Amino acid sequence: MKIVIGSNNPAKVAAVKSAFHYQQTEFLSLDIHSGVSEQPYTDEETIKGAINRAVGALEQGNGDIGIGLEGGVQETSYGLLLCNWGALASKDMEPIIAGGARFLLPTEIAERLRAGEELGPIMDDFAKKENVRKNEGAVGIFTNGLINRSEMFSHIMNLLVGQYHYKKPLGSKMSCY
């Protein structure tokens, strides 16, 4: 089986690999454009970015499954929440989607996002680090390392893979072991 990941981000790639426990699985990661803004600002936009990455990965990587993972933010009456969505595309079914944990971003981060900045550079500046998005992510910074970005996406991947197994025809279910 060939799994094509629509990103080269190490946190996303690690999450995908952790969700598939097949002995004969080939992984390919490609830089697939999300087709949405650099900073998705709603669940709808973030979902669309994940689906675009999954479908693009499936098509461009000529795989059995395409995976798209996308981070974004969602405005609520309580403030700006970090959100993460994923999509799994295969040739024999409509894309499957799943969302992950959410948490309220600190006011100083939310204000900069509302002013039009992207979360990745904001977090690098805030944490005084480089490539926070490719490592612990905002979730790692704001949970004091208890949860990192890869773990947050791993939860989504397990939701996607579980749905995939559920939706596959009975005779073609794959084993996770």
Image: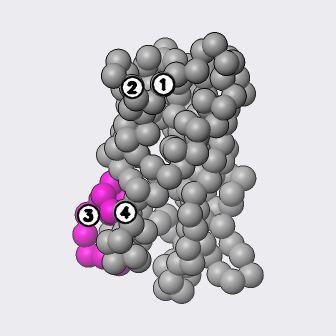
Q: Residues within 10 Å of mark 1 (few under 14, many from 20)?
A: few
Q: Earlier in the sequence, mark 1 or mark 4?
A: 4
| Figure check: 12 above or below 174 | below
**Mark identifier at residue 22:** 2
From the image, state whether disc 4 or disc 2 is nearer to you.
2
Where does the N terminus fall, quadrant-wise?
Answer: top left
Q: Residue at x 45, y 30 (%)?
A: 176
Question: Identity of the amino acid at label 4?
Answer: Asn
The region drawn magenta spans 126-136
Q: Nearer the viewer, mark 1 or mark 4?
A: 1
Amino acid residing under circle 1: Ser
**Residue 175 x, y percent position in the rendering:** 48, 25
| In the rendered image, the vertical position of residue 27 relative to residue 91, given as above or below | below
**71 left or right of 136?**
right
Q: Which residue is mark 4?
A: 148
Task: Say which residue label 1 marks.
Answer: 175
Indicate the position of residue 133 as horizontal and vertical percent values. Answer: 37, 58
User: For this view, does 88 lie left or right of residue 109?
Assistant: right
Residue hosting label 3 = 130
Q: Can residue 31 be seen by looking at this rendering? A: no
Q: CA distance from mark 4 to mark 3?
A: 15 Å
